[in-house]
Amino acid sequence: MAEFIKIYEDNPNPKEIKRVVEVLRKGGLVIYPTDTVYGLGCDITNTKALEKIARIKGIKLAKANWSFICTDLSNLSDYVRQIDTATFKILKRALPGPYTFILPGNNNLPKEFKKKKTVGIRVPDNNIVKALVEELGNPIVSTSIRDEDDVLEYTTDPELIYEKWDNLVDIVIDGGYGGNVGSTIIDVSTGGLPEVIREGKGSLDII
């Protein structure tokens, strides 16, 4: 059974953040709020946890297109090849915010993602998930939790999320109601003009 932990976004309790991070370090799966929809994630360095998420999602790990949640742009070079000034300016304008940027991956990607030429980077404008990543010391691999109901694509109520995911994850964080519109996905991996892959919550004025 998963733990259900209330954390306030205005002032995330450091003790609760540490508790969640301990679970992440041990290979646990956590559901947490972002600035768009609730996400499901794990420690990027934990192979077993990555495999668990792939099983839940019903996909092969090598084929997974998940994003990496970072606290800011300072660690970008850990996983991303050098980008040009124009691309960096777009990232600076947009982040933190409701965007996923597809960027060219470098040779330091975790072994599970080595074959990938690109990586999705997220810096959500949400204090809870930012505090988790900061305490963990490396990115969280993240995927959004979808609802099978076509009318309501994403579940927004943390209690309903907990009911549904109780036996699949280790912790569900109640950070208040989530959104039901995903992030805007923009491909800037080619160095050419940015390509909008999916229009979501983020405005396209930043391009």
Image (tube, rainbow, N blue to C red):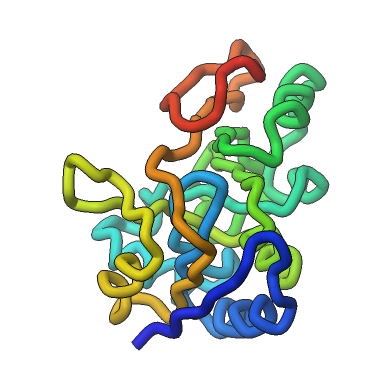
Q: Quadrant of the C terminus?
A: top right
Q: How many numbered marks, from 0 up?
A: 0
Quarter location, residue 26: bottom right
Q: Position of residue 60 (x, y in %)?
A: 31, 57
Q: Position of residue 61 (x, y in %)?
A: 38, 58
The reply, left or right, for residue 182 in relation to residue 128 is: left
Residue at the image point whose x is 51% and y is 79% from the top:
5
Residue at the image point whose x is 64% and y is 61% from the top:
9
Residue at the image point whose x is 55% and y is 52% from the top:
34
The reply, left or right, for residue 178 in relation to residue 110 is: left
The reply, left or right, for residue 48 in relation to residue 84 is: left
Q: Position of residue 155 (x, y in %)?
A: 32, 54
125, 184: nearer the viewer: 125
Relative to 95, residue 48 above or below: below
Q: Residue furthest top?
A: 193
87, 48: nearer the viewer: 87
Quarter location, residue 159: bottom left
Relative to 8, residue 194 above or below: above
